[in-house]
Amino acid sequence: MPGKLKAFHEFRSAMNEKLLSKGNLQLKRFFNLDSQVYVDGALPGKTKELMGLVASAVLRCDDCITYHMIQCADLGVTDEEFFETFNVTLIVGGSITIPHIRRAAETLEEIRASGKRKRDKRGNGNMVNRQAKSGRKGGIGRKDKE
Amino acid sequence: MPGKLKAFHEFRSAMNEKLLSKGNLQLKRFFNLDSQVYVDGALPGKTKELMGLVASAVLRCDDCITYHMIQCADLGVTDEEFFETFNVTLIVGGSITIPHIRRAAETLEEIRASGKRKRDKRGNGNMVNRQAKSGRKGGIGRKDKE
Amino acid sequence: MPGKLKAFHEFRSAMNEKLLSKGNLQLKRFFNLDSQVYVDGALPGKTKELMGLVASAVLRCDDCITYHMIQCADLGVTDEEFFETFNVTLIVGGSITIPHIRRAAETLEEIRASGKRKRDKRGNGNMVNRQAKSGRKGGIGRKDKE
Amino acid sequence: MPGKLKAFHEFRSAMNEKLLSKGNLQLKRFFNLDSQVYVDGALPGKTKELMGLVASAVLRCDDCITYHMIQCADLGVTDEEFFETFNVTLIVGGSITIPHIRRAAETLEEIRASGKRKRDKRGNGNMVNRQAKSGRKGGIGRKDKE
Amino acid sequence: MPGKLKAFHEFRSAMNEKLLSKGNLQLKRFFNLDSQVYVDGALPGKTKELMGLVASAVLRCDDCITYHMIQCADLGVTDEEFFETFNVTLIVGGSITIPHIRRAAETLEEIRASGKRKRDKRGNGNMVNRQAKSGRKGGIGRKDKE
Amino acid sequence: MPGKLKAFHEFRSAMNEKLLSKGNLQLKRFFNLDSQVYVDGALPGKTKELMGLVASAVLRCDDCITYHMIQCADLGVTDEEFFETFNVTLIVGGSITIPHIRRAAETLEEIRASGKRKRDKRGNGNMVNRQAKSGRKGGIGRKDKE
C-alpha cells in the first residue's frame, strides 16, 4: 500500500480508537449511526457510498473523499464511474472543487496500485472484493468510519 | 399541481429563459453542460440524479433540492429511497440540514399529490414516466435545469 | 405569539411528526441524539445552546438560529448575551452573516413580546422558565428539535 | 421602486437601526469597517463592489447579492458586466449558484426599472449617478451596509 | 512544546507580523476587533472561546480550531468539556467534521503534553493559567489572533 | 522558483494532464469554460482574476488562491491591490479566512521572489508580462487552470 493511503489509514485508525475510548456515549452513537447509513437498504450500498463520495466532494473534505473512494473501490466502482462522479461534483460544486478532484485522481491511482499489489500477493482479486462486501453486511470493519 | 411546485416551475422557466436570452455564450454552455451531466452513462441517470439531490442537500439549496426531487420522482425513486437519501444527507451534513429535509418532505408530498392528479387525469401513470425518461435521453426538456 | 414564530412552530412540529412517522430508524436515532446533545453535562445546557446558536449563525441557517434562540431565551439568555453571541458570529463569519443577524434581531423582539404575553396571561414568567428547564432535563419536549 | 427592492430597503434600514442602537461597540465598529472597505483605494470602488458581489454570490446570500448589485448599479455597472460577474460565479461556485443567479437577474430588472422611474421623475439620470458616487466618497449613505 | 503546535505558533506569529506591517489600516482594525471579541463581557471569556471553537469546527478550519483550543486550555477547559464541544460540532455539522475532530483530538494531546512540560519545568501549573488569564484581560498577547 | 510554488505547479500540471487524458468529454468542456471565463470581455481580465481570487478566498481554497494570485501577478496586480483584496475577503468572510490570508501573504512573497529571479535571468520583466498576457488572449497556456 503506497505512502499516502497507508498514512491515512494509520492516523485514522489510531485517532478513531482514541475518540471512541475517550469520547462520550453521544460520540459513540454518532459513529455507530455513521457506519450504518451506507449499508444495503432500499438503495444499494454502492449507490449510497457514491452519494457519500459526492457529498464529501462538494463539501470539499479530502479525508472524507479518500475514505469513500476506498469504500467505493471495494464495492467495485470502476474508473469511468469515478470520473462521472467527479463530473457531477464539478458541475454542482464548480471549479473550487478542482484541487480536490486532482487529489482524488491521485488517490484513485494509489487505490488501483494497492489493489493490484494485493491481487498479486494473494492470486485472487475477486476474493478480496467478496470479503470486503460480506464484511460490510456483517457490520464489521466499518466501526472506524470517515 | 399544488401552489409551491407550480410557483417554482413558473419562476424557474421564466428566469432561465431570460438568463439564456440575455446571458453570454459562457452561461449557455454551462447550462448545456449542466443538462448533460445527469443522463445515463457509466452510471445510470437515476443514480446521478440522486447524487445531484444529496449534493444539493448537503450544500443546503432548497431550489436545487426541489429540482432534483422532481427529476428523481420522474425516474421512479420511491419514498423509501428518498428517505435513505435524506439519511445520508443528515449524517454527512448534520442537523443544520434538518430544516431543508423538513421542506423536502413537504415537497415530496406535493410531488406525489401532483403525480396522482396527473395519473387520475390521464389514466396512465407509467406512460408519464416513460415519456419523461425518453425525453431525457433525447436531451430535451432539461435545457432550463436547476 | 406573533406571526413568524407561530408559523415556525407549526410547520416545524407538523413536518417533524411526518419525518418521524415516515422516516426510518436511522433518522429517528439522529433526532434522538440531536435532542440529547444540548442537555446539562460537563458544560451547562445554556452554554451548549449558545454554541448551537453560534454554529447555526456562522453556517447561516435561519430556522436553526430561530430554534436555538427560543431555547436560549427559555434558559434565561439576556439581550446583552445574545448581542455578544452575534458579535462572535460577525467576527468569525464576516459580513455575509449580517442579513441573518438582522433577522435574528427581529426574532428576538418576537420572542420577548411572546414571553411578555405569556407572563401577562399566566402572571408568572419564572414558572414558565422552570418548567422549560425541567422538561429538558427529563429529555422530553425536544423530540422535534431543529 | 418595485415591491421586492422596496421591502429589502425598508427591512434592512429598520433592523440596522435597531442593531446599531441596541448592539454593542464591537458591532458598530464592524459595521463601520464594512462601510469603509468598498471605497476607492488602490483598487477603484467599482472593482471592490464587484468583488463584494461575486463573494456574496459564491457564498450564496441573496440579501448580500441584492445589496452589492444596488451599489454596483449606482457606480455604473452595465448589464454585460453583471452577466460576466454571474459567469465567474457560475464557474467558481457551480450550478448550486443558479437559483441565486436567477433571483439576481430578477433583481437587475427591478433595479433598471427603478432607475428608469427615477430618471423619468427627475429628468436627469446622470445626476443621480454623480450624486451616488460623490455621496460614497464622502463616506455617507453607507452606514447601514449589507 | 511538540512539533505541530510549535510550527503552528511560529508560522502564525511570523505571518501575522508581516500582515500587520504590510497590511492597511482596515486589516489592523479587523485584527483588533478580533482580539477584543473573546474577552469577558456579558458572557465569560471561556464561553466565548468555546463559541469560537465550535464555530471554527463547523466551518472546518484546522488552524482556527487549534488556536481556540489553545485559548480554551489556557482558560481551564477540561477534556470532558472539549469532548462535549466536539459532540455539538458533530451533531450540528455532521460526519464531514470527523477528520477535523480527529486532528483536534491529536492537538489536545499535544496541548496537554506541552502544559505538563511547562508545569514540570516551572513547578507551578496554576501560575501559568493565572498569567494567561490576566494577560488576556490586559489585552496583550492576543494581538496576533487566529 | 521557490519550493512551494514549484511543487504547486508540478502537481497541478501532472494531475490536470491525467484528468484531461482519463476524464470524459464533460470534464474537458468544463475545464475549457473555466479557462475562458477570465479573459478580457466587458470587464478586463485583471478585474475578473481579482474576482476569482476573492471568490476562492471566501470559499477558503488555498490552491485556488495560489492559482489566481499567480495570474493576478502576471497581469500586474500590486501588493497594495492584493492587500485590499484580502481586506474585502476578511470583511465578507470573517476571521475564518485569516489562516488562508496568512498563507496567501507567504505565497505573495514567493511570487515576488520568483518574479525577481526571472527578471534577473532574462533582464526583461516586462517581456514576461507581455508574453503571459498575449498567451492568455490566444487561449493557450491556461488549459490546466485552477
Image (cartoon, coloured by chain):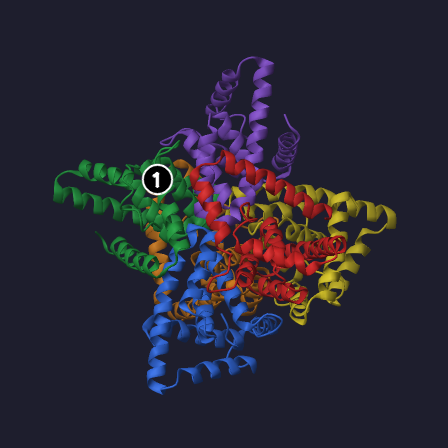
Chain colours: A orange, B yellow, C purple, D red, E green, F blue
Identify residue type, mark 1. Phe
Q: Is residue B2 left or right of residue F73?
A: right
Position of residue F60 in the picture relative to residue A47 (left or right): left
Q: As drawn, which residue projects farthest toward the top?
A: C123
How many numbered callouts? 1
> Callout 1: few (<14), some (14-19), or many (20+) C-alpha neighbours within 10 Å?
many
Residue located 40% across and 71% down the image: F8
Q: Is residue A86 above or below residue C113?
A: below
Q: Position of residue D80 (x, y in %)?
A: 66, 67
The residue shown at (33%, 55%) is A11
Residue E104 at x, y percent in the picture = 35, 48
Place of residue A127 in the rendered image (x, y in percent of width and height, measured from the top left) = 46, 63
| Residue A58 in the figure: left or right of residue F128 | right
Residue nearer the viewer, D9 or F74: D9
Q: Secondary structure at mark 1?
A: helix
Q: Nearer the viewer, residue A49 or C122?
A: C122
Q: Of residues D87 and D24, which is closer to you in this image?
A: D24
Residue F18, horizontal then vertical, whole percent: 49, 75
Q: Residue at x 38, y 68 (%)?
A: F108
Left or right: F66 in relation to F106: right
Q: Is residue A11 above or below residue B99?
A: below
Which residue has dot 1 on it? E82
Q: Along the line of sight, which residue is nearer the eye, F90 or C124?
A: F90
Tell which subunit mark 1 falls on: E
